[in-house]
Image: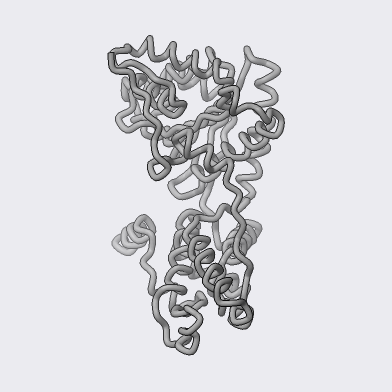
Amino acid sequence: MNTKARTPSATETTIYDLDGHRRAVQQHTEAPAALSVAGLKRLPADEREQWLADRDEHHGHSHVVMTNAMIEAFNDVHILTGLNWHRPDDREVYLISGPAGSGKTTIGRSIAREFERQYATKHPGYLSSGEIPVVVIATPARCSPTAFDKAILTFMHHPFPDSFTHDKLKAQVIHALRSHHVQLVIIDDLHRLKQRSALSIETSDLLKEYLDLSTASYVYMGVNLTASGFFNGDAGSQIASRGALLQLQPFTNEPGPAREEWCNVVSALESNLRLLRHRPGALTTQKMLALLYNRTRGSINALNKLLQTAAIRATTIPDTATEDLRNLGIIGKERIDLQLLRSIKSVAAVEVEQRQRQAKR
């Protein structure tokens, strides 16, 4: 009998694997100090080289901004898990829906990470006792109930024979969720359940069974869930009736409170930049806010990637503005301006949308 159980290496892990999730929980990184050219010159050579290396790594990471939606989700899930703990026979689920790039996955990952950190504070010996308080999976492509069973068991590194039927796998999932004291299950990409598909309805039935038979709380996420096939069938409609929905929307640059949050998000990401010649506030002028919005259509994911790309370009592509700093290891422009932003390709989805609008004119 072939029983699957393999621990991925560090380079293979993602947030959808227990090792990758645990690494995110335990990782506490600090940004390198913000320096000017003069500040860099004052550092000894070895410290200067280390700062430049740390700066490159820092710019390579995607930065999480605490948006109003994320704060709302944190509070909602905190309340949900507390209520579900005290009323196990009448538990509710939490649904996060929105267009692609609106930050659903980032919110889900942040909830998973912070929930387990809080759990670790209350239960410091939980790892040695084999507890897995949080499970995070993505809906498998061409999803079926069996594929869902296997995704959960694989995340938990819980072995299962290839020969097991869906019913046996489901029993293994429920047993694993209970025996490892799973408190929170986050399921992403539920839009992969195709509308009116028999498999989708069967999988919705399975999710309802998970909810009924385990003691965990559930967070479901996906692109425009209300328009997908997720709520089809009796089980889907029951889940909808027992769930609170957080509907995400892209940011806007139109006058009003929404523009203020867009400005705050840009400002937060700008504060993470470690560019020697960048002037704080340069990205939050009216002209720059409009340009960034037009390039990203208000998608926080697209904005994050655009500024990451810009930061790396500003530090690694040779520019004549810093020719006199080559002896310090500086080759790039070390600032983000209109010219640099215009040299970066838009996120493909934004480019496609813009071309479609132009074609309709």
Where residue 254 sits in the image (x, y, percent)? 57, 62
Residue 276, picture quadrant: bottom right
> Nearest the camera: 330 or 205?
330
Residue 149 visible in the current orientation: yes
Residue 48 appears left or right of 7: right
Q: Does residue 114 sit above or below 289 in this rendering?
A: above
Residue 180 appears left or right of 318: right
For the C terminus, the image quarter is bottom left
- Residue lying at 57% horizontally and 42% vertically, measured from the top left: 110
Residue 251, picture quadrant: bottom right
Q: Does residue 113 sit above or below 250 in this rendering?
A: above
Residue 241 appears left or right of 357: right
For the N terminus, the image quarter is top left
Residue 297 visible in the current orientation: no
Q: How is the image coloured?
A: one colour
Where residue 67 sits in the image (x, y, percent)? 62, 51
> Nearest the camera: 176 or 105?
176
Where residue 141 sits in the image (x, y, percent)? 32, 33
Residue 72, picture quadrant: top right
- Residue lying at 44% horizontally and 76% vertically, measured from the top left: 340
Circle count? 0
- Residue lying at 46% horizontally and 73% vertically, measured from the top left: 315
> Nearest the camera: 355 or 156?
156
Q: Does residue 145 sit above or below 252 in this rendering?
A: above
Where residue 113 sits in the image (x, y, percent)? 58, 39
- Residue lying at 48% horizontally and 65% vertically, measured from the top left: 56
Residue reaching furthest bottom?
Answer: 324
Q: Does residue 238 sit above or below 351 in this rendering?
A: above
